[in-house]
Image (cartoon, rainbow, N blue to C red):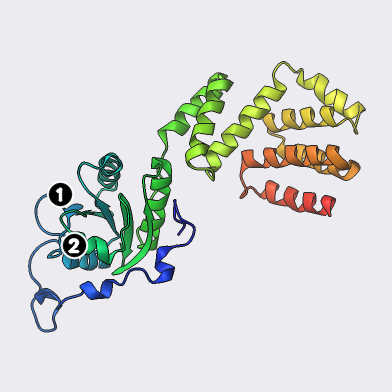
Amino acid sequence: MSDPRITSSIFTRGAVDLSTLRGPAPASSRPGTPPQGGPSNGAPAGGNTAIVDVTEATIQSDVLERSMAMPVVVFFGAAGFPESDEFAPVLERLNAEGGGSWVLARVDVQENPRIAQMFRVQGIPMVYAVVGGQPVDAFSGVVPEAQLRQWLQAVLKAGGVTVAEPEDPRLDEADDALMSGDLDAAEQAYRKILADAPADAAATAGLAQVGVARRVAGADPAAALAAAESAPDDVAAQLLAADIEVLSGLAEQAYSRLVGLVRRTAGEDRETVRQHLVSLFSIAGPDDPAVASARRALASALF
């Protein structure tokens, strides 16, 4: 799982040992003891059991034991600290969206300094993920919601929770702008998503489509294709023809056209064609068989 703020996980450095929190097993888990009533997932009965306020007296039951049944996200903060006050409601809202698939365990560092010390908390807000009784990842500070959602998805997967990929309403707005022809608004919306989540494939594809739409604006498709046919080594004509083919549903033909042009060009022209082709790949996505085949052909043409 990748951390949204730090590249080297603190857990690889042995920063936290939760075994010190483990006390005697609860009566319901001791051999020969009948199970007690209450929720089967280890959550306390009554109230909103997906959000709990943790103290030294409850950390074993609220964090360690519950993490055996579902992922627990431990939030370290304190009232009156702007970043903490800003970030806590975001986590609470995402927890509500999760429908009980994970637990948000809130720790007030002012009231529970020993817990904060044990987790090596040096600044707030700080967030830990605990799965199966062990911490699996963490980050400090406030992160964009898009990154936080991706991090939570990874935490849930690490906990064996089957989750659906969340829909980003901003993507719908960007797509609507693209479909309506408002290319400036679409580009701005896609770039905003990518600023928060640089690896977002849908936004990358959308931005590439904006580029294609701008390049073909005002062009006569039939005339452009005829011009490319009569001038096979004219880079500008071939790039425009490839764009038109992609928009016409002839992506494989466009890829083949540009791979052939890569073979026939050199220097800056070759790099221009290569970059153009790669941008067209992003529209279809890396899992498209035609893209995979074209990438192999491109590699062969380059090397």
Q: Residue at x 49, y 42 (%)?
A: 197
Residue 260: x and y in percent read 85, 42
Q: Residue at x 89, y 42 (%)?
A: 266
Front position in the image: 151 or 225:
151
**Does residue 143 appear anywhere in the picture?**
yes
Label 2 residue SS: helix
Q: Residue at x 77, y 17 (%)?
A: 220
Label 1 residue SS: loop
* Horizontal relation, residue 33 to residue 264: left or right: left
The residue where tag 2 is placed is: 62
**Does residue 41 appear anywhere in the picture?**
no
* Horizontal relation, residue 124 to residue 205: left or right: left
* Horizontal relation, residue 66 to residue 122: left or right: left
| Residue 41 falls in image quadrant | bottom left
Q: Residue at x 41, y 56 (%)?
A: 154
Mark 2 vs 1, N-terminal side: 1
Amino acid identity at mark 1? Asn
Tell me the crowding category of disc 1: few under 14, some 14 to 19, or many 20 or more residues within 10 angstroms, Cα based. few
Residue 209: x and y in percent read 62, 31
- In the image, residue 166 sits, relative to residue 155, either above or below, namely above
The residue where tag 1 is placed is: 48
- In the image, residue 91 sits, relative to residue 42, either above or below, namely above
Q: Quadrant of the C terminus?
A: bottom right
Amino acid identity at mark 2? Asp
**CA distance separating discs 2 and 1:** 13 Å
Residue 264: x and y in percent read 90, 42
